Amino acid sequence: MDFTFDDEQKALQDAVRELASRHAPGEVHGDVPVGPAAHDPKVWAAIAEMGLIALPFGEDVGGAGASTVEVAIAAAELGSARVVTAYAEALTAAGLIAHGGTDAQRAELLPDLLDGSSLIVPAFAEPGRAWSLQAYDVTASGAEGEVTLTGTKEPVPFAEAADKLVVTARVGERTGLFLVDGAAVSGMRVRFDNTPALALGSLDTAERGIQAGVNLGILAVTAEALGAMDAALPMTVEYLKTRKQFGVPLAAFQTLTQRAADMYVSLELARSTVLYTGMALAADPHDATAASRAKVVVGQAGRHVGQEAIQLHGGIGMTAEYAVGHYTARITAIEHTFGDTRWHRAALVESIADHEQVDVLA
């Protein structure tokens, strides 16, 4: 399979790399704030102006008419520069609306979201429960046109900055999609208390809409993790070449260079998987298997590359002033976004029966 970028994709990569370099975090001194990243309107405006949110959507709703491969390219460059934004969240919300909403809802909501005029983020996770595409705590009641939601969603990244939320809520034994404006938000906790909501599409379209939106979000975050790994490895290799122990560079010790080589193998496996996932979702936005594979492979590779980067740097890798620790922290956060490695591995195991048995010795 050919993962070579064409000229337009290379131009996009260069443009996003230049944008990301201008908005990358500066050198860190002293204490570093902990907790979720704050929404930066300037960075968001720059991303929207370049059309990165609009990449995988059709021109009829204000999109760029590109594909999910371009999303992976853009997200990887943002991850490499440590630019943390609501990019994956906005793409997920747009995917939910595009695949789960009605034609009228798509025409009304997507143009402003894709050009950055409004920020809509998804609300899936519920406190005290493992990740699931199904809603449990948040319930919807009322007739069409007068729906209200009750319950709590947490964590909801960038909820405080969002103009609207796309919320999964339980309707009987099924899960529907709802658009909410003006919920009670405190940090990443969103509480609904008979909060008015607008049903997106119908219960019959919700399941496929949820899967397509989450798949797009998974592609964006795994590509961001790829970018972080792609930056952490060269930093580690350069450190091994320059840092001396017993009068010789660390790179002179064979065991350390072998560990760096293993990091490279993990990185390239993650790269191939992310690009394949982009191609798979371009062909079928509802391909849950491809998305789960990406989460498993990138989750394992990210843990390996991040931990080895810190180990090979020694004490400096743990300091706030050095970027490798921040890359690893972001990779770790991504590993738990849209379901962790264990959850997606279990999802893949459940689908084993759908595949024919292969005799590898035949």
Image: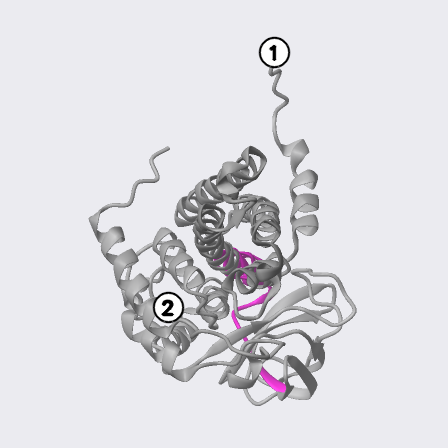
Q: x, y percentage for residue 354?
A: 63, 33
As drawn, the residue found furthest toward the front would be 247
Q: x, y percentage for residue 93?
A: 49, 69
**Quadrant of residue 138 in the image?**
bottom right
1 and 2 marks in contact (CB < 8 Å)? no
Give above or below for 52 relative to 67. Answer: below
Q: Which of marks 1 and 2 is nearer the N terminus?
A: 2
What secondary structure prevails in the magenta region?
helix
**Residue 202 among those drawn in magenta:** yes
Observer able to see residue 79: yes
| Amino acid type of the residue that numbered disc 2 sits on in the rendered structure | Ile
Residue 3: mark in rendering: none
- Identity of the residue drawn at 48% across and 72% down: 86
Packing grade of label 1 (10 A; few <14, some 14-19, many >=20) is few
Q: Nearer the viewer, residue 81 or 84?
A: 81
- Identity of the residue drawn at 52% across and 69% down: 201
Left or right, 141 with respect to 117, comes to right
Q: Which of 357 and 11 is in front in this view?
A: 11
**Residue 57 among those drawn in magenta:** no
Quadrant including the C terminus: top right
**Quadrant of residue 44 in the image?**
bottom left
Q: Nearer the viewer, residue 144 or 130?
A: 130
How much space separates mark 1 and mark 2, taking CA atoms? 47 Å
Q: What's the coloring here?
A: one colour
**Residue at the spot of label 1:** 361
**Residue at the spot of label 2:** 53
| Amino acid type of the residue that numbered disc 1 sits on in the rendered structure | Leu
Secondary structure of residue under mark 1: loop
Packing grade of label 2 (10 A; few <14, some 14-19, many >=20) is many
Q: Give the range drawn in magenta.
A: 196-216
Q: x, y percentage for residue 257?
A: 52, 37
Secondary structure of residue under mark 2: loop
